Image (cartoon, rainbow, N blue to C red):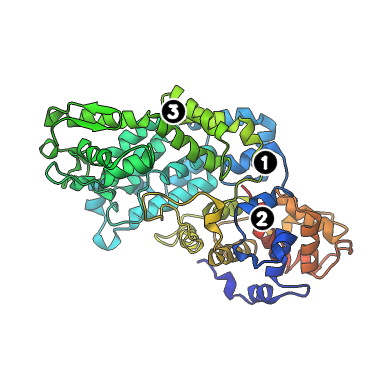
Amino acid sequence: MTANPAASPGRRRVLTGLGGGSALAVTQALAGPAKAATAAPQATSAATAALAADTTTSDPVLHLLRRATFGPTPALLAEVRSTGTTAWLDAQLAPSAVADAAMDAVVTRWPRLNWKTWEVRERVPVSSSGDVMYDLLESHMSRAIFSRRQLFETAVDFWTNHLVVPVPSTEVWDSAHLFQRDVIRKHALGKYSDMLNAAARHQSMLKVLDNSDSHKKAPNENYGRELLELHTVGVGSYTEVDVKQSALALTGLGVDSESGLYSYKPQRRFVGAVKVMGWTHANTSPEGGDAVATSYLNYLATHPATANRIATKLAIRYVSDAPPATLVTKLAQAYLVNGTAIAPVLRVLFLSPEFAASIGQKVRTPYEDALASIRIMGLTPEPMPAPGKSELRNLLWLTGTFGQAPMGWPAPNGYPDVAAAWGGASGMVNRWNFHLGLTGNWSLTTMARPALATWVPSPLPMTYAALVDALAAKLLITLSAAQRDAICRFVDHAPTDALTAGAAAVTWKLPYVVALMLDSPNFATR
């Protein structure tokens, strides 16, 4: 069970101050003098990213791994240095060719993810109706942390936050896992036109956005609107008349009440000419409505405004909170030239000069910070847990305290992906507590990890400054002299003081020292 680091005597000592100053004061010092003058718990912002750029490494390999994975590790860094960045990128863009036997074995822990909707209904009692959804969330996090197909998993997370189906939810208790499998994961690096069509014919999307209730006599505009506003062309590209016509074009796309599966219902289909933006169709028969919907969805998927919207969102996710217009134009062109295929767009993105120049311009979201912390600390999958007792379930709860549980955004617009959205003090303090829980082995305790004592170099560094630099290197970050000195002061020593065996900095204070580095803007930089 996950312990509460804030409740431990050691954590209270850090929060109230240890010798040279409080943890907050040290974290302010880590953030730099410009931030120390302000109360820094809410300092995660675009300014923090710019600040971190002054001290973080400019290594292009680390830059790629910070953006294309859920956090670099020393082993992955060595692998990419050996294979080369382009070769690694090309392999990641063809994930089925990336050997991932260990992750494939872990996923077998959740056999219910293969159950059809009717099987879930038959085999899961009402009292346990959330079980399959929690299987989905646990497997989603496990893949993000442990899979070798890291770029694919970041793309899965991106699309999960684009075509939003909130989980857990009573509307999708029997089908959300299939939406992830058959819509998101199946098409994450494929054609967006295929993903959009699959989403429009999946019971989860049709229920969440109410198209399952739409009827020619009473068309529901919810899905028709979100399809335009969020999934494709975006605000400013359509009118309210287009929204109403969009709803009519989607009538008949429904859900069978008995099986719970997608079912085209001609009896509900509006018949008559439909027009949305530049798309028109005679729409002459109820039976032909499914094909009309395909024509409409393909029109939207290939529209230049959709290309621009998808390109912009990808650039925000992987490059910058305010991506260069030149890059967005390149990505939109690649999207259209490649028939809405995503893998070629990402290849253009990661090989672009705009990406190379974007070091320090992204900050990890709370969810990404948690995963990156777990990866850099070297945690491994726990032994097969008892039902409902897994550390991944605990991690799910913890990410909720950060404000970003996976699939937990209730609105159809998805979690924000810019730093300014994640500067709240409460979530920040919870993340700091989580870092200390990891380094002190108080959190996610059944996930094995290397003992923190093994992080201390042998032979022992001669000075406290050398120790801090060595620990920072383990975290794949570079600290400024001011940051390093602040940590030395935290353990009541000058940077040049001689380090001795048995010193507090390499024994009981070691978890606090490493946790402070995880708290730093250097580590928060993506």
- Local crowd at mark 3 within 10 Å, few (<14), some, or many (≥20)? many
As drawn, the label of residue 341 is 3
Q: Is residue 342 above or below residue 222?
A: above
Nearer to us in this view, 190 or 125: 190
The image shows residue 278 at horizontal and vertical percentages of 30, 28
- Cα–Cα span, label 3 and label 2: 35 Å
As drawn, the label of residue 521 is 2
Nearer to us in this view, 37 or 134: 37
Q: Is residue 116 visible?
A: no
Indicate the quadrant where residue 505 lies: bottom right
- Local crowd at mark 2 within 10 Å, few (<14), some, or many (≥20)? many
Left or right: 251, with 142 as reference point: left
Name the amino acid, label 3: Ala
The image shows residue 350 at horizontal and vertical percentages of 59, 33
Left or right: 89, with 249 as reference point: right
Secondary structure beneath label 3: loop
Q: Is residue 237 visible?
A: yes
